[in-house]
Amino acid sequence: MKVYTLKTKQILPISLEEAWEFFSSPLNLSKITPAYMNFVIKSELAEKMYPGMLISYKVSPVAGIPITWVTEISHVEENKFFVDEQRYGPYSMWHHEHHFKELDNGIEMTDIVSYVPPFGILGRIANSLFISKQVRGIFDYRSQVLEKYFPKK
């Protein structure tokens, strides 16, 4: 089993409290997900995440084919980090860490995604052909959208 990792960093010109307010609300996830994913939250959600929260989505990551994806918020340390992990979905394993660090000019947000594509060797081939590019593209999109939501002053 090969685990792939994507690590991204972004500096946003906002306070740690503003960052936490935005990112700890699962309702904001659809705002920063590319439209082609057809991302729809299917579960009833609280305004703020908490450890053990399960979130069910419908997404269409490949060829417009809808699939169910269920993640659990497994760890939360307010104003520092949270972790979501796939419980059911398109990957054999998905573990996404979101870290926040206060800086003089805003916050540094670090995402660390570790994932295993399904289907063994076929999944590794698919990862080299398109999955890794798609995962990177989702985070590139997110970065662009966040720069519009939180423009430099």
Image: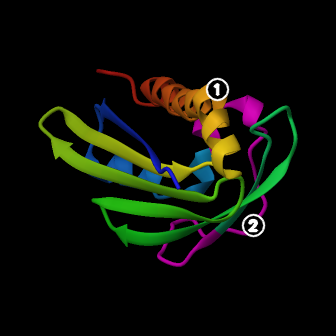
- Residue 50 vertical position relative to residue 130 in the rendered view, above or below: below
The residue shown at (47%, 51%) is: 3
**Amino acid under label 2?**
Ser
Q: Which quadrant of the rendered structure holds the C terminus?
A: top left
The rendered magenta stretch, by its main secondary structure, is classed as loop
The residue shown at (60%, 35%) is: 127
Q: Residue furthest left?
A: 104
Q: Position of residue 72 (x, y in %)?
A: 57, 69
- Residue marked by disc 2: 43
The residue shown at (50%, 50%) is: 2
Q: Residue furthest front?
A: 121
Image-quadrant location for residue 7: top left
Q: Residue furthest right?
A: 65
Residues in magenta, as a range: 30-54
- Residue 151 vertical position relative to residue 55 in the rendered view, above or below: above
Q: Residue furthest bottom?
A: 52
Image-quadrant location for residue 109: top left
- Residue marked by disc 1: 129
Q: Which of pointers 2 and 1 indicates the residue nearer the eye? A: 1
Q: Is residue 105 magenta?
A: no
Q: Is residue 53 magenta?
A: yes
The residue shown at (45%, 28%) is: 143
Per the image, label 1 sits on a secondary structure element best described as: helix
Crowd around label 1: few <14 · some 14–19 · many ≥20 (10 Å): few
Assess whether mark 1 and mark 2 are in contact (beta carbons under 8 angstroms).
no
For marks 2 and 1, give the CA distance.
32 Å
**Amino acid under label 1?**
Leu
